[in-house]
Amino acid sequence: MKYKRLNMIMLMLLAMITSCNFIGPDVYNIVKTNADQGVDTINFTDALWFDWDTMYWFPSNYPLEEINAIVNINNYWQDVGDRIVFVKDHKIVYYNEFFPYHETPLERIDFNTDSLMVVGSDDALFSIQKVGDKLYILSSIKK
């Protein structure tokens, strides 16, 4: 009887673990890991753990109303940071916000642009420039 109960508990745990969605590391940590390993470029199509077809970079000065007209982020945290949004079939599959520097530098990536950037998964190659201890600037490399 003990073994039957133990087997049942193990089976339930296995079912719970396999039914959970894996959430991979955030994009910042992927960029940081590449840079720390001496890699000076990153291809988001190959490097990310999720499928996507369009990436949007919204600088902090981009109006929230206009962001929502492009991709609806009303269900996500709304603040004053730069935003990176990955979309697959018009649905958000990844979203992150990077806040501007205050007294203490925050871990963040930034793109070498002051305006909205839209990138397709077939053109997602970027150079990585490490600036300071926690900031990485990405610049688009055209194929």
Image: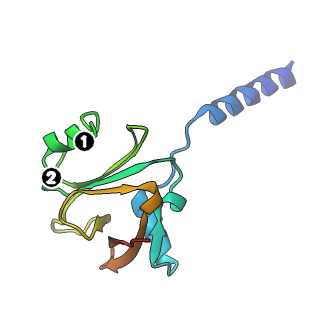
Q: Nearer the viewer, residue 3 or 93?
A: 93
Residue at mark 2 to residue at mark 1: CA–CA distance: 12 Å
Going by the numbered disc 2, the residue's amino acid type is: Tyr
Q: Amino acid at mark 1?
A: Ile
The residue nearer to you, when weighing 38 against 112, is 112
Residue found at x 22% / y 58%: 99
How many numbered marks, from 0 up?
Answer: 2
Q: Residue at x 39, y 71 (%)?
A: 142
Residue 26: horizontal and vertical position, in percent?
Answer: 43, 55
Residue 112 lies left or right of residue 7; in this view the side is left
The disc at residue 62 is 2
Residue ID at (22%, 57%): 116
Mark number for residue 80? none
- Relative side of 9 to 55, left or right: right
- Residue placed most toward the observer, 69 or 81: 69
Q: Which residue is mark 1?
A: 70
Q: Secondary structure at mark 1?
A: helix
Instruction: Check disc 2: other Cα within 10 Å, few if <14, some if 14-19, many if 20+.
Output: some
Q: Residue 84's x, y, as percent? A: 31, 53
